[in-house]
Image (tube, rainbow, N blue to C red):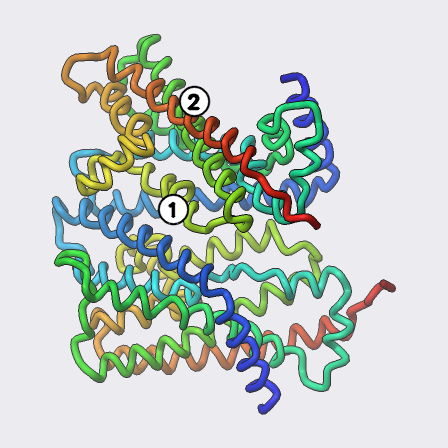
C-alpha cells in the first residue's frame, strides 16, 4: 500500500507543474460551458412538455461536468503508458517489485486527480458568482453534498478501472488509436458528456443505466443537484462499489493473463 | 502550386503504408461527430425545435460547419501542428529553401483520416437537403458551395493565427482551441440562438455568422429581400483569411530559432 501511496504523491506533484496549461484549460472550459448552457437555454425556452430535468439542474450539471471533465473523459491525454507498451520499455516496469495493475492504477488515478484539483476550484468558484441564469447553485442539503463527494470519488475509481481496459487492450492490438477512439466516444456518450442522460430518449436511457459509464460522472452530478433523491443515491453508491470490485477483479485477471504471454523484443 | 500537390501525393502514399491503422482511424473520425450529431437528434426529438429552427434546418447548418472543419483540418494540419516544428527547430530548414514558407508549412502535414469526418458530414448534408422543402436554383447551389468554401477559409485562418502565435510563445496555446473546436461546436447551431454578445463577436470578429447564419436564412427563404447580399456574404467572410496571412508574414520575420 505504501508503494501506491508514494506513486500517487509523486504523480500529483508532477501534475501540479503544468500550471499554465491548466489556466488555458480553465479558459477553454468556461467558453464550452457558456456555449452549452446557451444551447440548452434556447431549447428550454419553448419546450412543449416539461422536460424531466429542470434548466437550473442542467446548468449545475454542466458546470460540474466542466470542472471535473477529467472524471468524465475516458481518453486522457497521456501516451506514456501506450509508449511503454509499444516500445517494449514495459520490461522495466515488470522488474519493479510491485504488481503492475496496482502500480498503473495509482499512476492513472493520480494523473486525473492532480489535473482535476488544479482545474475544478477556479471553475467552481467563478461559476458560483456568475450572473443569474448562468450561476451554479448549492446542493439542496448537507447530506446531498456528502453523498455527492463520496459518489464522485467512487466514480473516479470506477473510471480508472474502466480506462485500465483500454491500456490492457493495447497489449493485443499494439496500436492505441482507432478502435479505442470508438470505445471512448461510446463511453463518453453514455456517461452523458454530449447530452445529459435524463434528456436521452427512453430506450437509450435503459442502455445507459445498464452500462458502467454513467456511474462515473452522470450519477454524482445528479446527486449534487438533488435530481436523484438521497435514498436512491445510497443504493447507487452500493452499485458503484459493486462495479468497481467487479471491474478491478476482471482487469487484474486480464492483465496478469496477458503479461504471462508478453514477448519483449530486443531493443 | 505543383509543389503543393507533390507534397500531397507523397504524404498520402506514406499514410497509406499503414492501411489497417488508417482505416480504423478514419472510422474513429467518423464516429466522433456522429455522437455529437446523435446528441443533437435526441435533443430535437425531445424539444421539437430551437428558437424556431427545426431539426433539418439545424442539421444543414451542422453539416456545412463540420464539412468545412473537416476539410480545413485535413489540409491545414501543418499549421495546426506548427508548434512542434518550432520547438524542434525544424522551421530553420523551411526558411533556407527557395520557396514560400506558407506553401511549405501547409504541405508539411495532411490528415487524410479526416475523410471519415468529411463523410459523416456529407451524409448529414444529403439527409438534410433531401428532407427540407427547398426550391433549388443555381443561385442557391452557388450559395451552399460558397458557405462551405468560406467556412474552410475561416477555419484555416484561425489555424494560421494559432501557428503564428508560436513565433512568440514557442509552445502552442491551448486557448486557440476555443476558436477552432469551440467555434465548430458553437457554429453547428444557427448563431441567433445565442446571446447577442456571442453572436456579434462571431459575426464581426471571427465571421462564422457569415457562413452559418445569414446565408442559411437565404437558403431557407427566411430573409426579407436583398437576396444578392445574403448570397454573397460568405464571400465577404472568407476575406478573414487575408489579415491572417499578413500576420503570418509578419510572424515569420520575428522568428527566432530555438537552436536545437
Left or right? Give the position of A109 relative to A53. right
List x then y, in percent, for residue B249.
52, 29
Q: Nearer the viewer, mark 1 or mark 2?
A: 1
Along the line of sight, the residue nearer the viewer: A11 or A99: A11
Q: Quadrant of the N terminus of chain B?
A: top right
Q: Is residue A76 above or below residue A90?
A: above
User: Residue B149 shows which numbered tag?
Assistant: 2
Calculate the distance from the C-alpha at mark 1 to the C-alpha at mark 2. 21 Å
* Residue A56 location (% of width, % of height): 17, 61
- Asked if B106 appears above or below B256 in the picture, the reply is above
Occupied quadrant, residue A258: bottom right
| Chain assignment, label 1 | B
Q: Secondary structure at mark 2?
A: helix
State the residue at coordinates (33%, 19%).
B236
- B251 or B161: which is nearer to us? B251
Against B61, residue B231 (above or below) is above
Q: Quadrant of residue B234?
A: top left
| Image point (58%, 91%), residue name | A2
Is residue B114 visible in the rendered image? The answer is no
- Residues at circles 1 and 2 in contact by the CB criterion of under 8 Å: no
Q: Residue at x 42, y 41 (%)?
A: B180
Relative to A200, say whether B105 is above or below: above
Report if residue B155 is visible in the image.
Answer: yes
Query: Quick one: label 1 or label 2, which is nearer the N terminus?
Result: 2
- Residue A67: image quadrant is bottom left
Badge number at residue B178: 1
Mark 1 and mark 2, same subunit? yes
Amino acid at each position: 500500500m505504501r508503494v501506491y501511496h508514494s506513486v500517487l504523491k509523486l504523480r500529483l506533484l508532477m501534475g501540479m507543474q503544468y500550471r499554465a496549461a491548466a489556466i488555458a484549460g480553465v479558459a477553454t472550459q468556461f467558453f464550452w460551458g457558456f456555449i452549452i448552457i446557451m444551447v440548452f437555454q434556447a431549447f428550454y425556452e419553448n419546450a412543449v412538455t416539461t422536460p424531466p430535468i429542470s434548466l437550473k439542474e442542467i446548468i449545475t450539471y454542466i458546470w460540474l461536468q466542466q470542472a471535473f471533465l477529467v472524471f468524465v473523459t475516458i481518453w486522457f491525454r497521456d501516451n506514456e503508458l501506450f509508449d511503454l507498451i509499444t516500445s517494449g520499455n514495459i520490461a522495466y516496469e515488470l522488474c519493479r517489485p510491485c504488481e503492475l495493475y496496482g502500480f498503473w492504477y495509482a499512476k492513472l488515478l493520480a494523473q486525473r486527480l492532480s489535473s482535476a484539483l488544479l482545474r475544478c476550484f477556479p471553475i467552481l468558484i467563478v461559476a458560483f458568482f456568475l450572473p443569474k441564469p448562468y450561476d451554479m447553485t448549492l446542493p439542496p442539503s448537507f447530506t446531498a453534498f456528502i453523498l455527492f463527494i463520496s459518489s464522485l470519488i467512487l466514480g473516479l475509481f470506477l473510471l480508472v478501472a474502466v480506462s485500465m481496459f483500454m491500456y490492457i487492450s493495447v497489449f493485443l492490438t499494439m496500436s492505441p488509436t482507432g478502435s479505442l477512439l470508438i470505445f471512448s466516444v461510446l463511453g463518453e456518450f453514455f456517461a452523458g458528456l454530449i447530452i445529459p442522460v435524463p434528456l436521452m430518449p427512453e430506450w437509450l436511457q435503459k442502455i445507459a443505466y445498464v452500462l458502467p459509464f454513467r456511474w462515473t460522472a452522470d450519477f454524482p452530478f445528479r446527486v449534487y443537484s438533488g435530481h436523484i433523491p438521497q435514498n436512491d443515491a445510497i443504493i447507487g453508491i452500493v452499485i458503484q462499489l459493486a462495479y468497481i470490485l467487479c471491474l478491478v477483479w476482471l482487469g487484474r485477471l486480464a492483465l496478469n493473463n496477458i503479461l504471462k504471454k508478453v514477448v519483449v523484443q530486443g531493443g | 502550386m505543383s509543389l503543393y500537390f507533390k507534397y500531397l501525393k507523397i504524404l498520402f502514399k506514406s499514410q497509406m503504408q499503414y492501411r489497417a491503422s488508417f482505416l480504423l482511424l478514419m472510422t474513429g473520425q467518423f464516429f466522433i461527430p456522429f455522437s455529437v450529431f446523435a446528441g443533437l437528434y435526441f435533443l430535437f426529438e425531445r424539444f421539437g425545435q430551437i428558437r424556431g429552427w427545426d431539426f433539418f434546418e439545424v442539421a444543414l447548418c451542422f453539416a456545412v460547419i463540420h464539412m468545412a472543419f473537416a476539410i480545413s483540418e485535413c489540409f491545414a494540419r501543418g499549421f495546426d501542428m506548427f508548434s512542434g516544428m518550432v520547438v524542434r527547430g525544424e522551421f530553420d530548414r523551411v526558411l533556407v529553401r527557395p520557396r514560400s514558407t506558407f506553401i511549405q508549412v501547409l504541405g508539411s502535414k495532411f490528415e487524410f483520416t479526416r475523410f471519415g469526418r468529411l463523410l459523416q458530414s456529407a451524409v448529414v448534408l444529403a439527409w438534410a437537403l433531401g428532407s427540407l422543402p427547398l426550391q433549388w436554383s443555381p443561385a442557391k447551389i452557388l450559395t451552399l458551395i460558397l458557405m462551405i468554401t468560406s467556412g474552410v477559409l475561416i477555419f484555416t485562418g484561425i489555424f494560421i493565427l494559432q501557428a503564428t502565435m508560436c513565433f512568440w510563445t514557442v509552445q502552442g496555446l491551448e486557448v486557440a482551441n476555443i476558436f477552432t473546436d469551440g467555434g465548430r461546436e458553437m457554429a453547428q447551431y444557427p448563431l441567433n440562438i445565442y446571446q447577442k454578445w456571442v453572436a456579434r463577436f462571431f459575426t464581426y470578429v471571427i465571421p462564422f455568422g457569415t457562413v452559418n447564419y445569414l446565408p442559411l436564412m437565404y437558403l431557407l427563404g427566411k430573409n426579407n429581400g436583398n437576396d444578392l447580399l445574403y448570397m454573397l456574404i460568405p464571400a465577404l467572410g472568407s476575406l478573414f483569411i487575408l489579415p491572417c496571412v499578413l500576420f503570418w508574414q509578419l510572424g515569420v520575420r520575428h522568428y527566432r530559432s530555438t537552436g536545437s
